[in-house]
Image (cartoon, rainbow, N blue to C red):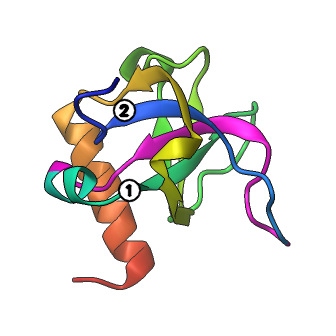
Amino acid sequence: MVKEYQWNIFWVNLDPAKGSEQSGTRPVLVVSTEPVNRALPVVTVLSITSMKPGRKIYPTEIRLPQRESGLDMDSIAMAHQIRSISKERLGTVCGKVNNPELREQIHKTIMLYLGIS
């Protein structure tokens, strides 16, 4: 059992999905805080997608270098795909964001996306 959720990257099955929602089994980054994670049966996550060569990074996205995330390849966390999911959906841990600068960049990108100053 995971003792802390925030900043861990888990494998999750996001199906069923509708429209442009991320779907399938993919990594997600938990961004909700530990006091909230302990109190609720859900966590808030950002979907992660692989970084394809030449792929543009949009203002609502954060590049997750392989060496900083523990993932198998450079990836992108998508603030525009933020959602809360049941902890029951969480699979195995496949990485973690430990770098304080990268964590701050993730915070700023979420705030930009949500319009929070």
Q: Position of residue 79 (x, y in %)?
A: 50, 61
> Real-space Cα distance between discs 1 and 2?
16 Å
The front one of 86 and 99 is 86
Does residue 61 appear in this view?
Answer: no
Residue type marked 2: Asn
Relative to 24, say whether 73 is above or below: above
Does residue 11 appear in this view?
Answer: yes
Q: Which mark is residue 41?
A: 1
Residue type marked 1: Pro
Q: Quadrant of residue 21?
A: bottom right
Q: Quadrant of residue 69?
A: top left
Q: Which residues are magenta?
A: 19-34
**Would you say the residues marked 1 and 2 are in contact, meaning their CB atoms lie under 8 Å apart?**
no
Q: Residue at x 21, y 83 (%)?
A: 117
Q: Residue at x 38, y 56 (%)?
A: 41
Q: Say which quadrant the N terminus sits in.
A: top left
